[in-house]
Amino acid sequence: MRKLFILLSICISYTHLLQAQTSDDRAQLLQLCIDLPEIQANYPTFENESKAAAYIMQYPLTIPENLPIHKFEKKPVYMTRSEIYDNHVDAYFLFKQIEIGSESAQIEFTMYSNYNSNTPQIVDVYLNFQKSSTGWLISNQKLENK
């Protein structure tokens, strides 16, 4: 019985370790996505030249809101699809696919900007990542302007 308890404790500890690693990995990968140099010009700027927080649509994937990611020293604003549309959010991310393995990851998302104007900018982004000793690195990327 004692061996079973020890084995069960080890399994629970390992499960918590994997969840923590996956959460850390997810945070690092999403930070790389919103900081991708090729999309920085798409962020809206206010008259005082400050930048808006990053908005993330919680559809079709739901991103955990407690991840430690920031843009322009602000936490992202997470909204449902109807909240994005009802509040006329002009720029936001829509994550379509997030697959994280132990050594590689793939993320697909779309960044919408100037969405409520006559000239919306829509960029589909496909990223492949490899894990290194220093963290995640983009190994392949593809951007499609729509």
Image (cartoon, rainbow, N blue to C red):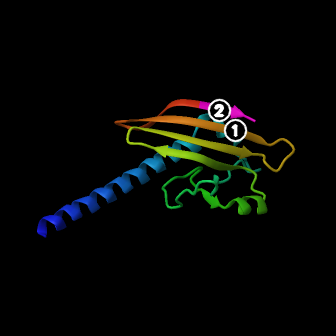
Residue assigned mark 2: 143
Residue at 13 percent across and 64 percent down: it is 3
* Highlighted range, magenta: 142-146
Residue at 54 percent across and 52 percent down: it is 70
Task: Work out which quarter of the rendered image holds the N terminus and state it.
Answer: bottom left
**Residue 2 drawn in magenta:** no
- Residue 106 spot, x, y in % from top left: 51, 39
Q: Work out how far the residue at label 2 is from the one at label 1, CA to CA, in angstroms.
A: 6 Å
- Residue 123 spot, x, y in % from top left: 70, 38
> Which amino acid, by three-letter code, is at mark 1?
Val
For residue 130, which quarter of the picture?
A: top left
Relative to 141, residue 50 above or below: below
- Residue 57 spot, x, y in % from top left: 65, 55
Classify mark 1: helix, strand or loop. Answer: strand
Pick whichever, 131 or 15, lies toward us: 15
Residue found at the very far left of the displayed protein: 2
Q: Are marks 2 and 1 in contact (CB under 8 Å)?
A: yes
> Which amino acid, by three-letter code, is at mark 2?
Leu
Residue assigned mark 1: 123
- Residue 75 spot, x, y in % from top left: 57, 57
Give the mark nearer the N terminus: 2 vs 1. Answer: 1
Relative to 82, residue 117 above or below: above
Horizontally, is 127 left or right of 46 in the view?
left
Please tell me whether the stretch drawn in magenta is mainly helix, strand or loop: strand
Pick whichever, 53 or 3, lies toward us: 3
Pick whichever, 50 or 24, lies toward us: 24
Relative to 68, residue 134 above or below: above
Residue at 55 percent across and 41 percent down: it is 107
